[in-house]
């Protein structure tokens, strides 16, 4: 599987780079920033579009950015600087790839290739699930990303949340077996049974975990679905999953036909 960043189409070597942006001012189009080159110290003009900065789900705290603040962002494009000339970096704080870059900075096993990130599902400002896998025997990919006492994960969260609030990161063990992968992706809920058919996964959890399995506003199930590429439907353990699956597929077909 290709890594996330290999799909960005790097028209410029700067695209896909994580940077610290220093906010200079704000306007209708977004936040004007300066990004300093680590080697030369030269400042580059950058823009964090307002639509990107505020593309957050209901209930997520919006950024409170003002001149003098700093924010960690990903370079997603390089544009013409306009009348002032030169180039302008276009930044994003909400793309899933930013999570991949930030986590890699704290996990040696990712930098050395012993652990790879297989996918990221993110609702910016709220929660992200990151699927990881080892490339060599004996490596605990999830444990490596979390770190002793969750030190690596907490450090990544602190850097990601600079200026944005309380986004949580969850590390998921990737599996080539889709049922196992779905069960892992439902973390921290314990899945008792999984049935997969035609892009849909019916997942059973114990009744006391049902609300958490779905997640507030359906978030946990939604992110598990994004991570695995499946539509995830959560039910109470003990239900006939075959019957539930038939009903879900029937409802989906009826909705497509209408």
Image (spheres, rainbow, N blue to C red):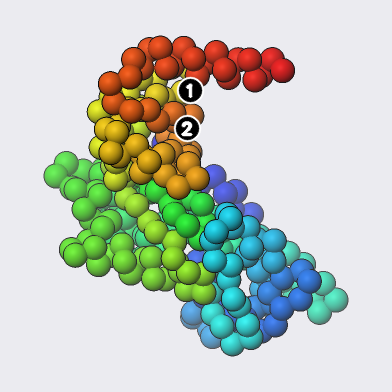
Task: Kindly state the secondary structure of the residue where label 1 is placed.
Answer: loop
Task: Kindly state the secondary structure of the residue where label 2 is placed.
Answer: loop
* Disc 2 packing (10 Å; few <14; some 14–19; many ≥20): some
For image coordinates 48% across by 29% down, the residue present is 231
Q: Please tell me in which quadrant of the rendered image residue 240 appears.
A: top left
Quarter occupied by the C terminus: top right
Q: Which residue extends farthest left?
A: 138
Q: How many marks?
A: 2
The reply to whether callout 1 and callout 2 are in contact (CB within 8 Å) is yes
Quarter occupied by the N terminus: top left
Q: In the figure, is residue 13 to the left or right of 85?
A: left
User: In the rendered structure, which disc, 1 or 2, sits on the residue that comes first in sequence?
Assistant: 1
Residue 35 makes an appearance in the image? no
Name the residue tied to disc 2. Answer: 229
Q: Does 169 sit above or below residue 132?
A: below
For image coordinates 31% across by 55% down, the residue present is 110
Name the residue tied to disc 1. Answer: 199
Q: Cα distance, mark 1 to mark 2?
A: 7 Å
The percent position of residue 234, horizontal first and vertical second, equals 40, 30
Q: Which residue extends farthest front?
A: 208
């Amino acid at each position: 599987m290709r890594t996330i960043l290999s799909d960005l189409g790097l028209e410029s070597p700067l695209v896909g780079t994580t940077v610290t942006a220093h906010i200079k001012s704000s306007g209708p189009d977004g936040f004007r920033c300066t990004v300093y080159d680590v080697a030369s110290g030269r400042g580059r003009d950058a823009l964090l579009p307002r639509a990107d900065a505020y593309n957050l789900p209901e209930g997520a705290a919006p950024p409170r950015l003002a001149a003098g603040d700093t924010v960690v962002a990903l370079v997603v494009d390089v544009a013409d600087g306009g009348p002032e000339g030169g180039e302008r970096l276009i930044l994003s704080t909400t793309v899933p790839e930013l999570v991949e870059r930030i986590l890699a900075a704290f996990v040696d096993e990712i930098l050395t290739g012993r652990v790879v990130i297989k996918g990221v599902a993110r609702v910016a400002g709220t929660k992200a699930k990151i699927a990881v896998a080892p490339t060599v025997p004996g490596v605990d990919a999830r444990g490596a990303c979390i770190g002793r006492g969750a030190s690596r994960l907490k450090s990544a969260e602190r850097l990601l949340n600079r200026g944005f609030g309380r986004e949580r990161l969850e590390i998921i063990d990737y599996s080539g077996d889709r049922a196992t992968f779905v069960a892992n992706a439902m973390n921290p809920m314990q899945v008792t049974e999984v049935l997969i058919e035609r892009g849909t996964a019916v997942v059973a959890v114990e009744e006391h975990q049902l609300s958490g399995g779905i997640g507030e506003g359906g978030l946990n199930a939604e992110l598990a679905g994004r991570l695995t590429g499946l539509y995830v439907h959560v039910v109470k353990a003990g239900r006939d999953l075959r019957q539930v699956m038939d009903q879900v597929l029937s409802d989906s077909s009826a909705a497509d036909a209408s």
